[in-house]
Amino acid sequence: MEYIALEKLLDKSYGSVYKLVVLASRRALEIAEGQPKLVNVDASLKPSTVALLEIAADKVRAQKVKGEK
């Protein structure tokens, strides 16, 4: 498994670790429930790892909330 730098992932969640965790967990649940994976990965990877890889590849992104900096 390749290493995913936290700094690279934080850029996708507007610098918030909380948003990153929520985004990754929601996407991991979708993958576990049968949604197709958005990146080509080995089938043995866990949904949480696939979710982080999708975030790193800009396939999944957090939405900016209105009124937020």
Image: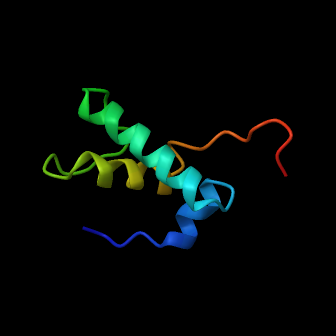
Colour scheme of the picture: rainbow
Q: Residue at position x 56%, y 61% from top?
A: 17
Q: Is residue 7 left or right of residue 64?
A: left
Q: In the image, residue 20 lies at what x, y percent?
A: 53, 54
Q: Is residue 13 left or right of residue 49?
A: right
Q: Residue at position x 50%, y 43% from top?
A: 59
Q: In the image, residue 26 lies at what x, y percent?
A: 42, 38
Q: Is residue 59 left or right of residue 66?
A: left
Q: Is residue 57 left or right of residue 63?
A: left
Q: Is residue 30 above or below residue 20?
A: above
In the image, 31 versus 41, the foreground residue is 31
Quadrant in which the N terminus appears: bottom left
Q: How many marks?
A: 0
Q: Residue at the front extreme?
A: 18
Q: In the image, residue 36 lies at what x, y percent?
A: 31, 30
Q: Residue at position x 27%, y 45% from top?
A: 47
Q: Is residue 14 above or below residue 43?
A: below
Q: Residue at the top extreme?
A: 34
Q: Residue at position x 18%, y 51% from top?
A: 42
Q: In the image, residue 2 lies at what x, y percent?
A: 31, 70
